[in-house]
Image: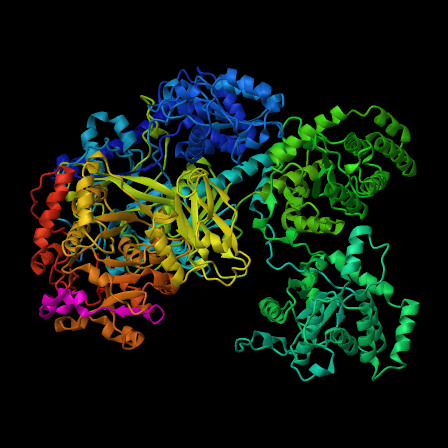
Amino acid sequence: MAAARGSRSGVSRAALALVAAVLVGCLAGGVSAAEIRRQKNVQVALRAKWAGTPLLLEANELLSKERKDYFWDFVGHWKELDKGSECLTAKCCVQKIVEDVRSLLSEALASFFEFSLTLRSASPRLVLYRQLAEESLSSLPVKDDALEQIPGNGPVEETCCWVDTGSTLLFNSADLHKWLEGSGKGDSTGQPELFDFDHVYPRSNITAPVAIFYGAVGTKCFKELHVHLAEASKQGKVRYALRPVLPSGCQASSSFCGSIGAADAVTLSGYGVELALKNMEYKAMDDTAIKKGVALEDPKTEDLSQEVRGFIFSKILERKPELNAEIMAFRDSLLSSTVSDTLEVWELKDLGHQTAQRILHASDPLQSMQEINQNFPSIVSSLSRMKLDDSIKDEIIANQRMVPPGKSLMALNGALINIEDLDLYLLMDMVREELSLADQFIRLKLPQNAVHKILSAAPPAESNSFRVDFRGSHVHYLNNLEEDALYKRWRSNLQELLMPVYPGQMRYIRKNLFHAVYVFDPASACGAETIDMILSMHQDNVPVRFGIIMYSSRLIDVIEENDGSKSEEDTSTLIMRLFLYIKETYSTQLAFQFLSNVHGSRSGGDDYSEEPVEAHHVEEAFVDSLLSGAKSHPQDELLKLQKENLYKQEAEENSRFVHKLGLYKLQCCLLMNGLVHESNEDATMNAMNDELPRIQEQVYYGHIQSHTDVLENFLSESSFKRYNPSITGKNREKRFVSLFASYHQEDSVLHDINYLHSHGTTDDVKPVTHLFAVDLSSKTGTKLLHQAIRYLMDGPNRARVGLLLYARRDSVSTILLMKDIIDRTISSFSNTEKALNFLHGLCKFYEGQHMVVSSAVGDSISTIMDKVYSLAAETALPVDDYRAWLTSFSADTVLKGIDKLSDFLFGQLGLEFGSNAVITNGRIFVVGEGDSFLTDDLGLLESMEYELRTKYIHEIIEEVEWTGVNPDYLTSDITMLVSSSMSVRERPSERAHFEILNAEHSAIKLNIMNSSIHIDAVIDPLSPAGQKISPLLRILWRWIRPSMRIVLNPISSLADLPLKNYYRFVLPSMDDFSSTDYSVHGPKAFFSNMPLSKTLTMNIDVPEPWLVEPVVAIHDLDNILLENLGDVRTLQAVFELEALLLTGHCMEKDREPPRGLQFILGTKQRPHLVDTLVMANLGYWQMKVSPGVWHLQLAPGRSADLYELPSKLVAIDSSRGKLIHIEVQKKKGKEHEDLLNAADDNHFQEKTDNKGWNTNLLKWASSFISGDASLKKKAEKNTALKDARQGETINIFSVASGHLYERFLKIMVLSVLKNTQRPVKFWFIKNYLSPQFKDVIPHMAQEYGFEYELITYKWPTWLHKQKEKQRIIWAYKILFLDVIFPLSLRKVIFVDADQIVRTDMGELYDMDLKGRPLAYTPFCDNNKEMDGYRFWKQGFWKDHLRGRPYHISALYVVDLAKFRQTAAGDNLRVVYETLSKDPNSLSNLDQDLPNYAQHSVPIFSLPQEWLWCESWCGNATKARAKTIDLCNNPMTKEPKLQGAKRIVPEWVDFDSEARQFTARILGENAEIAESTSPPSDAPKPDDKDLSQDVKDEL
C-alpha cells in the first residue's frame, strides 16, 4: 500500500513539475498573468415565465409517474412538520428528498429521479395545479365567514389549504366533518371534475361524492385535512383527490424543506446556446456606446473540473493553492489559443478523420467529443496538425459505403430516434419509460437477458392493409384471366409489371393478380348497381378477376336474433337460389346476367330504386334470362325449384358466411385481394392502384412468380377471418392500459381471478388473456357474458378468460344472485369440462328470462334456483353444493366484492361505470350499448393482439429457464403483464441495422453488462447534430450508465470548416442548489475565454415547443464584440420561456384540411383567451399556451356556423407542449359552403368594426404591452395625438434584429408618422427584438400617438428549417403572412427597418392591386455601374422570369384577404419546401421566393418611385423617391451608418431625435458616442466578391 501511495504521489509531483516548467516558460516569454486574464466570458440563463414551484411537490409528481401508490407513500413520509428539520440549506433538502426516494425505487430509477428533480421537469404540472386552484378559489362560495379571511392583500394561513366539493370551499376540519356527515344526502350533480392526471386516494369509492384537496405537504394546515379525508375515503364516504399547491404567501407556514424552489424563479436547462462567428462583410454594428445598465448577479465561475489539454486544474489547485494566479494564467493561456475560421484546403482534407482519432484516443472519449465540437474554432488548428492513423480512416470510409458521410443517427434499445426533433426532455421521457419497464420485468423474476431481449425486440409492424380471408365455396367468380379464352392473347410475363407505363395505363397480363370480390344483398339498390358495374368493367376488359358473395339482409337480422333457426324465405334468398341454379345448369355468364335482369324488371333499368324487389320481379327476370336457351319451359323449372327447395341450404349458408365475416355491416363492399373498399367503380380503380405497388414488390423479390397463386400468397401471409374496424383500427384509435401496478397491489383483484379455459387446455400456457368487465344489470352485458362462454366452447387453445362481473348497488337481488352463482361455479369447478356447459345453459336462461327488468323478485329467485339445480344435474355438477350456496347467499357480501372490483375497473383502468368491456392483454375494447360483439369478434381480437403485440414476447418468455417457480401457470400471468406494459410504451417504430457497421477502430464502445438501456449511434462529431448529441450522451452515461456503441462518421473530405461557432448545452447539477441557504440558483451556459476581436452572434437552441425571448441583455446579442466590454469581464444575458406550444393537425372527413378554420382556447370562465387559424399545409395550426387545463373549441362566427366540433379538454403539464389531431365535419346543409370568400371577409370586417366578440381575434400571435403607471399618466396626451389622426388606419409590418437595426427601425417609424395624418399601427415580429427596444416602444407609442403589436409564430416542425439567424429572419417576412396576423386585418405594408419614408403611406395603403395578393417594386436598372451584379438579367433567373420583373423585398403590400382566399401562403410554403432543400437555392430567401413563385402567386408591380436605393437606381431618380432604402452595395461594401448619413439628409435629424428619446426613457446620457473602430475581421472596402449574394439585407 505504501508503495502504491508513493507511486501516486510521484505522478502528482511529476505533473506539478510539468505545470511549473510550462508556467515558467510561458511567463518568461513575456506573457503576463494580467494580460492573459483580459480574456472575456459570456454567460446565459433561461428562466420560466411562471413563478417558482416547490421542489418537494415536484419530487412527488416525479415519483407518481413510477407508481401511483408511491405518491401517497411520499405524502405519508413528509406530512409531518419537523420532517427535514436537520437541513438548513437547499442542497441538504434535495439530498434528503432523494435519500427518501431511494428506499422506494431501484438504483437505476432512483438515479434517474435525482437527475429529473434537478432538471425541474415536473414544474409545469404544479403550475397546472396552481391554475386549477386559482379557478377553484374564484368560482365558488366559501363556507360560512371564511370569505372574510381571504383579503386582497395576500393569503392568510386558512387559504393555504382548502377542500373543493363542487358546491362550496371548506378551510378547516370542522367544516369538512360537517360536510362529510351530510354528503350522502347532497346533490351529486355539482361535483368537481376529475382529470386523468389527478391523484385519487387508493381504493376510493367511485360512487362517493368527490372532494378535491388543494394544499402542500409540509404546511401547517395540510396534515389535519389530509388525515381526515384519507380516513373518510377508506370508509367509502368520499372520493378524495389531492392537487398539490403551495399558494403564494404560504411559504412561511411550510416546513423546513417544503418551500425550497418556491421563492426563486425556475431556471431551466435542456437547451443549447450558440455563439457563431459572424460574417462582417458589411459593417452592420451600432456605434452607440454601451452603458453599464442594471447589475446582474455574479457570473458563474469556470468549471475547473473539466479537462483542458490533458490537465484537470481543480486537482492541481488542490495540491498547490499558493500558485493559484499562475495556474489560472496557464489555464487561460491554453484556452486562448488562436481562433480559426478558415484553413487551407490541404489542412481541411483529413480534418474529420483527425477529429475522430483525437476522440477515440482520449481517456474520456465522450468528454473529448463534447470539448472539440463545442469549442471547435479554438481547437481546429491543433487538430489539423495531428498525424493520422490509417486504420481509423479506412474503417470510417468502409462504413460510409453503408451510411452517408456526415449522417447522424441514434437508437434507444433498437428504436430509431429522430435527431432533428430530439431534446433532453423527450429523451428523458423515453429513457424513464425503458427503465421503468425493465424494473417491472425484473420484479416479475425475468432474468436480465430476457428483459434486454424484450426491450430491444422489434414488434411486428402494424400493417395499414388489413385483409379479410374470404376464400371458400361462397365466392362466385365471373371470369378467370389465366384460363378464359378471352384473355389468351394477353402476355404472361410478370416482369412487365416492373416496366414504366403512362399514368393511368393498365397492364394487360394473363394472370389473376387482382381479385375484386364484391359483397352485397342482391335485392338491394347498391347490389343492383354493383352487378351492372361488374358486367360493364368485364365487358371493357379491365384486367381484374371479378367475383361476388351474396347474402340476405333479412336472414342476417334473424341470425342476430335467434341464430337463424326460425327463418322464412325472403326475396334475397330466392335470388341466390335461382342464381345458383342457373350457374350450375347453364353458365356463370347467364347467372350474372340474371342478377342484372332482376333490377331491370323492377325499375325498367332507368335508375337504382330503393323500392323493395318483389318475388314476381325475380320470377320475371328468371324467365327472361332463360327464355332463349332453356332446356324446358322456364316456368316449369321455377315451379320445380320452389317445390323441391333446391339450393335453399346453400343460399342460407352464404348469408351465414357473410355474417361470420362481419361484412354485412357495410351493406355493399369490395374485397380487393382481401382489402376492404367501397364498391363503386372509382373505388375499384383506386384499389387496383393501391395494390399494384405491393404486387410489384413481391414480383421484384421473386415472391410472386408465374405459378404463384396471388390470392393465396397475400391471404396466407396476413389475413383474418373477420372484419370489425373497431378492433382492427389504427393504433392511435385503440386504448391500452398497463396491468402491472394493479397486479402488484396488496389484495389485488387480479389475484382473485379464476380463469376459464377451453376443454382440455386448462394446464396449457395461454399467451392471451381476456378479462371481461360485465355489467350484469344491462342487456349488452349479459349478451357479452354469453358470447365469452360460447367463445371458450369453440375451443381456442391460446386464450383464457377471466370474468369481472359487477352490478349497480341498487340492483335487484336476482342479479346479485346470478353473480354469486357464476363466481362460485368458476372458483370451484373451472377445471372441470362441465363448468362451461353449465355456464352456457345459465347464460342462455338468464338472457331469455330478461331478469334485468323482472319485478317479482321472490318468484325470480325461485325460478333461478330451480334452473340452477336442473343445470347442475344435467352437467354432473354437485347439486348439493349449489343448494348450500343458495342458502348462504348474502347480497351485502356480494356488494362488498363489487366495491373492490369497481375500484379496479373504474379507478385503475378508467372505465366508465355501467360500461361493458373486454381487456385483452392490456387493450381495452369497450362494447357500446346495443352493439353486437360475437364469438367471431373475440377470435379476431385474440388473433390481432397475439400476432401484433404478444407473440414475440411470449416466445422470449417461453425460452426462460425458470428456477424455483412453477412456470406453467405463472407464464400466462407474466405474458399478460409484460404485453400490457409494452402496449402503453411510446416509441418510434423505425429501426436501423447498426450491427452491420464496423466498430473496431472508429467507434466508442462502453459496455455495461447489466444495463437495461442500450444506445446505438452514428455521429458526425463536427456537425450541429454532433454538438447537440454529445452532451446528451454524456449526461446519460453519468446518470444511467447505459451500454453504448457510438460509430464516428465525419465527412471525409471537407471544403470548408464544418463548425464556425461555440456551443454550450445547459444541464442541471446538484451545484444549482445552495449549500449555504435555501436558495436555488439554477444552471447557466458559460463560455470562458472567448475571442476578443471576432464578432459573435448569439442563438438559443431550445426544444421545439418552447417560445423564448431575451429579457435582460445590456449588449447587442446579434453583434457581440468582447473587446468593447471594457472593464466588464463577463457579458450576461437572460432569456425567458414566454410560452409553450400547442400544435395540431386539423382534417375534415374525406376532404382537404379546412383552411382558415378558427379555434379558440381558454378556460370555462374565459373561453376565448387565445386563438388561431388552420393552414392548408397538413391542416397545421399552433397556439401559445402556458401550463394549465384549457378548453379548445371552434370560434364563434363562420367557423362555428359551418362546422361541428365538441369542446376538447387540453392539459398542458410538461415542458414538451402538446400535439393533437382534430377531425371536424360540416353541419348538414352546409357541405357546399366555403369557409373563406370575399363576402364573408367583408362581413367579418364589419363585425370587428362594430367591436364584436372578435375584437381581440388571433392574439395568440400577439403580445400587448400594457405599460406602467407612468405611461397611464400620458393617456390624455396620447388620446389627443390619436384623435388628431383621421381616416383608415395604415398597418405597417417590420422586423429587426440587433441594436443597429432597432435604431434604424425607430427612424423608419418616425419617418412614417411625420408624413401622414392618418392613424398608424405597427406590427413588429417579436422573436429577435432586444429587451431595450421592448422597453422603449410603449413610451414611443404614447409620445407619438401610434399603436403597435408584437407578433410571433413558431417555425413548424414539418417545414424545412433554416439554420442561420439571418435567413430565419428573412423567412419570417414571407412564409407566415396568412397566419401571423389577425383575420380581421385586411391589408398590411412591409417596410424594411433601414428605410426612410418621404410620403404619405396612406397612398400606398389605398392603392388598387388589381386583384393581386402581393405588390412589390421592381429593381431599378438605371445605375449602369451595377450591371455586373444584376443576376436576374442572366442565366436561370432570366429564363425563369420570362420577361417578368425581379422585385425588391424592402417594401411590399399584402392584400391579406386575397392572400388567404387564393391560398397564397400555402403555395409559397410548398414552393419554399421544394426549393430550400437545395443549399444553392433561395440565396436571398425573402426576395427570391416571391419572385420565383409569381407565376402561381401573382405580383402587382408598384411604380418605380415607391422604392429608391442608391446601389441600383442612381442619383437621377432620387428626387422622385417616395421611400429610400439603405441597400447594401456589393461593389463598395460601405457600412450602413456611413451610407445613411451620406445618402439621406434628414436621416441625421431623425436619428438624433430617436436616440435622445431613447436615452431619456432609459435614463442614459443623451450624448452621441463616437463610432467605435471596425472589428478586426471586417472586410476592407475594396474587397470584391462577385459571387456575393445581392441582398437588401436587414
**What colour scheme governs how the chains and residues are painted in the rendered image of this protein?**
rainbow
Q: Which residues are magenta?
A: 1494-1521
**On the image, which quarter does residue 1498 sit in?**
bottom left
Q: How many marks?
A: 0
Q: Residue at x 73, y 41 (%)?
A: 781
Query: 1238 or 890, which is in the foreground?
Result: 1238
Q: Residue 377: x percent and y percent?
A: 25, 49
Instruction: Report if residue 494 is visible in the image.
Output: yes
Q: Residue at x 83, y 73 (%)?
A: 619
Q: Is residue 98 above or below residue 730?
A: above
Instruction: Report if residue 288 is visible in the image.
Output: no
Q: Is residue 1395 left or right of residue 606?
A: left
**On the image, which quarter does residue 53 sit in?**
top left
Q: Is residue 1271 left or right of residue 1201?
A: left
Q: Residue 847: x percent and y percent?
A: 80, 42
| Quadrant of the image containing the C terminus | bottom left
Q: Is residue 903 above or below residue 1197?
A: above
Q: Residue at x 48, y 54 (%)?
A: 1201
**Magenta includes 221?**
no
Query: 336 or 1283, which is in the foreground?
Result: 1283
Q: Is residue 789 above or below residue 401?
A: above
**Magenta includes 1495?**
yes
